[in-house]
Amino acid sequence: MENQELFEQVDFKVNPQYEKIIEELLRQQYSITDTFFEASEIEILRTATLGKLEEDQFKKAAIGNRTNEVIAKTIRGDFILWMDEQKADAAEKVFFSKINPLVNYLNATCFMGILHKEFHYAVYPTGTFYKRHLDAFQNDSRRKLSMVCYLNEENWLKTNGGELVIYKPDGTEEIIYPLPGRVVIFESQLLEHEVKVVKNDQRLSITGWLKTR
Ligand SMILES: O=C(O)CCC(=O)C(=O)O
Ligand SMILES: [Fe+2]
């Protein structure tokens, strides 16, 4: 009751979806939300992604971060395109209108101190993968949370491959299918993960990092 009063004072509204994300992050270092984006939003984002792909805006993804890139096909085979929120187009505005309230909530309730975000589109053509890795680079320890948003079609088949595998500290694995609307969030510095080979079709997503100072 006391908490309720405190929240009311700062005009705070408890969001059950965000609370579930926080609870899962605290308990297991990762969280899966199946309906973070609505079908109509996925349609907009998917169409925009395919348009940019058509215009040849993507480039071969590298290892390291933006300032320290090495292309290594044996480690990852995806193609990416970085987003610039300052220059967000209509689809990207839809994207950030869903991401930013979550970031604000994390900062307000968990004192996460997220000051920066970076997001890129990613396309994994058939035959590509991203070997087991940690999203933490030698020259960038500011990545706090990794976020992956899947933009595949509703009828994406399990047999298409492209699963995200999260390697848990207890030695077991969580296998996550890249289904549309689904958003996976995990501790960038703690959880190793992998994208299994895509066997059919192309796998579409937006991946990003919430970063501290
Ligand atoms: O697309 C995914 O499921 C994960 C991508 C990933 O691990 C990365 O880009 O660092
Ligand atoms: Fe990763």
Image (cartoon, rainbow, N blue to C red):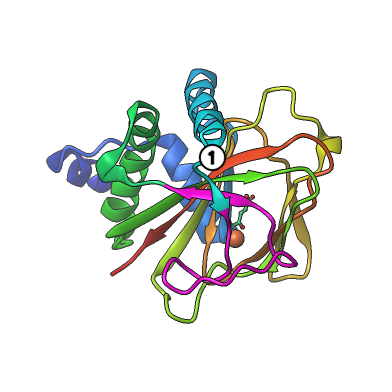
Quadrant in the picture for the C terminus: bottom left
Q: Is residue 168 among the parts visible in the rendering? A: no
The total number of labels drawn is 1
Q: Is residue 116 above or below residue 98?
A: below
Q: Secondary structure at mark 1?
A: loop
Residues shaded magenta: 60-82
Q: Viewed as shown, does residue 142 lie left or right of 169? A: left
Percent from the top left, x then y, of residue 40? 50, 18
> Height in image: 198 above or below 72?
above
Q: Quadrant of ligand 2?
A: bottom right
Task: Please tell me whether residue 47 belongs to the stretch shown in magenta.
Answer: no
Q: In the drawing, does residue 4 fall left or right of residue 45?
A: left
Between 108 and 190, the residue placed more toward the observer is 190
What residue is drawn where x is 22% and y is 39%? Answer: 12
Q: Nearer the viewer, residue 100 or 196?
A: 196
* Res 34 seen here: yes
**Which residue is disc 1 drawn over?**
56
- Identify residue type, mark 1: Asp
Q: Is residue 64 magenta?
A: yes
Closer to us: 47 or 118: 47
Residue at far top of view: 40
| Residue 162, above or below 75 | above
Majority secondary structure in the magenta region: loop
